[in-house]
Amino acid sequence: MQNSRVHQKYNCVLERNRIDLTNKKLVLFGTGQMSKILKIIPAYYVDNNEPKWGKSFKKRMINSPQALKAEAKDKIFIIIASQFYQEIALQLSEMGFAVGEHFFDGKQLFEKELEKRYLYKFRCSIRRFYRKFLLKYKQKYQRYRLKSGPWLIFPPKMGGLSYFKRVSLLRKFKLITKKVPCPHTQDEIITFVDAILRIPPEEEGCIVEAGSYKGGSTSKFSLAAKIAGWELYIFDSFAGLPDNSEPHEKSILGHSIKGWFRKGKYCGSLEEVKNNIAKHGEIGVCHFIKGWFEETMSLFNKRIAAAYLDVDLASSTKTCLKYLYPILVPGGVIISQDGDFPLVIEVYNDDQFWEEEVGCKKPYIEGLGERKLIKIVKR
Ligand SMILES: C[S@@+](CC[C@H](N)C(=O)[O-])C[C@H]1O[C@@H](n2cnc3c(N)ncnc32)[C@H](O)[C@@H]1O
């Protein structure tokens, strides 16, 4: 039974040396490192080291070499598991044992075992390395997903754009966010990009952005405008927010906005904005209208298919609605990123303002008082 196990384990070595252990008593000569490592359970061990005699090794007795003399030579096989093979082989020959027939150098079996051990260790270290690598990769990937949102993996529909075009656009958006200060989320931008890409091509009009800061949002919108074949008009003072005394306190999302909208905040010069768009967006579709909204928007007379407002102040929102809503085409959209500021919500909710200053009934405003991004579709 034991011998058949040895045959199974070291089959190729035993066959190469034409050794048959069937019906033979197996004895291991030597009780050092080699015997320790070999996966063989002999009938007993033999060792030249006298103090070891009579003791047990791997649950088997260690005998003196003299014990071999009492064995029937054709019923025994000795594996020399020692680095002193030559000396032991000579010793066994003197006792009448023949190499190959009665004994054999266990070094080959030992090497086989070592090979297996090294392979095992090597595999373990590779596994450990991969586990470490996968963990790192997983963490990085998760951080990346958290940072970029799930869009790069499952990009939203965005008009009729193909999957690859959407992914490529989102990659560009991510790069812009990295390079240009962007006080918006990709979600907000994607919502307006989707609106741009859904405008029927036969519609007359242009795209408007009010409030561009350093040109981050403008670069992103310009890429979408280029794809859809629209011109993009950008209104901004290019000197930051105007002087104001609006008492902003707390956003509906719960955070304080006290003192946020000081004069000159979010200042990006026209040159800076143009440079950023030239680097990351589509400068060819952009038209810049510099100045305070009250002065510039009142002169604007192009039809608008979609407008994006990110102007922070209630007064600026009023000006935008007053001048832009009347020239919005039916079916056109206005999206505002300031729907979380109570003073801005008041403007949108003010029936009198709509009737007296904009010249129409207050339209339905999607998400008003509930979320940051609000939307009006002109009926
Ligand atoms: C929050 S920033 C816009 C951020 C930009 N949309 C982005 O995401 O990168 C607000 C911008 O609105 C402009 N702004 C606000 N009120 C204005 C007004 N009455 N006239 C001209 N520009 C105004 C400021 O100059 C500023 O650039």
Image (tube, rainbow, N blue to C red):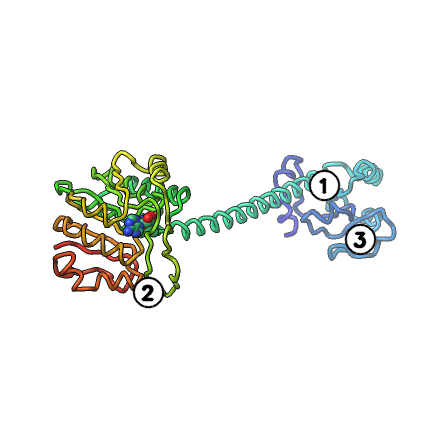
User: Which residue shows up at 62% across the image and 49% down it?
Assistant: 5
Is disc 1 surrounded by few (<14), some (14 to 19) or many (20+) residues within 10 Å?
many
**Is the Cβ of the residue at disc 3 closer than 8 Å to that at disc 1?**
no
Which mark, residue 106? 1
Q: SS class of the residue under badge 2?
A: loop
User: Which residue shows up at 18% across the image and 44% down it?
Assistant: 300
- Residue beneath label 2, please? 252
2 or 1: tag closer to the N-terminus: 1
The relative height of residue 27 versus residue 318 in the rendered view (above or below) is above
Q: SS class of the residue under badge 1?
A: loop
The amino acid beneath tag 3 is Ile
- Residue beneath label 3, please? 62
Q: Nearer the viewer, residue 357 or 88?
A: 357
In front: mark 3 or mark 2? Answer: 2
Place of residue 112 in the rendered image (x, y in percent of width and height, measured from the top left): 65, 40
3 or 2: tag closer to the N-terminus: 3
**Is the Cβ of the residue at disc 2 closer than 8 Å to that at disc 1?**
no
Which mark, residue 303? none
Is disc 2 surrounded by few (<14), some (14 to 19) or many (20+) residues within 10 Å?
some
3 or 1: tag closer to the N-terminus: 3
Q: Nearer the viewer, residue 257 or 368?
A: 257
Place of residue 144 in the rendered image (x, y in percent of width and height, measured from the top left): 43, 49
Place of residue 228 in the rendered image (x, y in percent of width and height, measured from the top left): 21, 39
